[in-house]
């Protein structure tokens, strides 16, 4: 897995011309640079990510599906370090565009009880049902989570808490 800037820049703390150009052009954000530094220090350069999505109070880190566990770290150690460094909540999702896997990663530790297709006047959208006993475990505002799912999968969703 690769980080958005080179190892030499991460070691030295000074950006080379190529990485400086990536930052200036917007190919790499300052947030991605900060996260890359933390990951490089904690993971010895073996943990990487594809991109980040800044949603205000929550940052979504998108990585390969098989790298999600590594990026979270044992007991959430790496995610906590990143969160402390950037001062925002951090969620890690796999780079799947599959609605179920993205929703499962994003809503964890809350459990999904089902996903339904709802046909309405404005087209079809998906209703993601979360178990009632997990309602307090939903990691953020429902509007924000729906927006993130839309960005990652391109699907319109509504997250609801099951009443049964």
Image (cartoon, rainbow, N blue to C red):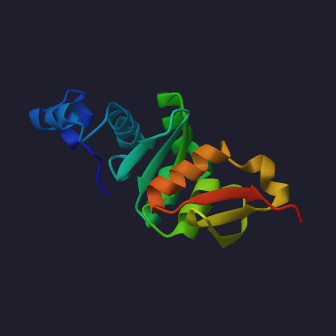
The image shows residue 90 at horizontal and vertical percentages of 54, 42
Residue at screen point 50% across, 39% down: 55
- In the image, residue 89 above or below residue 91: above
Residue 70 appears left or right of 51 = right
The image shows residue 4 at horizontal and vertical percentages of 27, 45
In this view, which residue lies farthest toward the front?
Answer: 121
Residue 163 appears left or right of 97 = right
Q: Quadrant of the N terminus?
A: bottom left
Q: Nearer the viewer, residue 124 or 151?
A: 124
Taking the image as drawn, is residue 48 in sight?
no
Rendered image quadrant of residue 29:
top left
Q: Quadrant of the C terminus?
A: bottom right
Residue at screen point 13% across, 33% down: 16
Residue at screen point 45% across, 61% down: 154
Residue 12 appears left or right of 96 = left
Taking the image as drawn, is residue 88 in sight?
yes
The image shows residue 74 at horizontal and vertical percentages of 57, 51
Residue 130 appears left or right of 53 = right
In this view, which residue lies farthest toward the left?
Answer: 17
């Amino acid at each position: 897995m690769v980080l958005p800037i080179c190892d030499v820049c991460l070691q030295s703390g000074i950006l080379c011309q190529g990485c400086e150009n990536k930052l200036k052009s917007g190919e790499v954000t300052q947030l991605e640079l900060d996260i890359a530094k933390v990951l490089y220090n904690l993971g010895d350069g073996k943990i990487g990510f594809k991109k980040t999505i800044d949603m205000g109070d929550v940052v979504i880190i998108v990585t390969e599906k098989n790298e999600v566990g590594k990026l979270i770290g044992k007991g959430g150690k790496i995610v906590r370090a990143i969160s402390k460094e950037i001062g925002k909540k951090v969620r890690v999702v796999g780079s799947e565009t599959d609605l179920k896997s993205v929703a499962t990663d994003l809503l964890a530790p809350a459990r999904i009880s089902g996903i339904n297709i709802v046909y309405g006047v404005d087209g079809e959208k998906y209703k993601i049902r979360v178990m009632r006993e997990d309602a307090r475990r939903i990691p953020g505002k429902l509007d924000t989570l729906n927006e993130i799912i839309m960005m990652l999968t391109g699907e319109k969703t509504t997250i609801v808490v099951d009443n049964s």
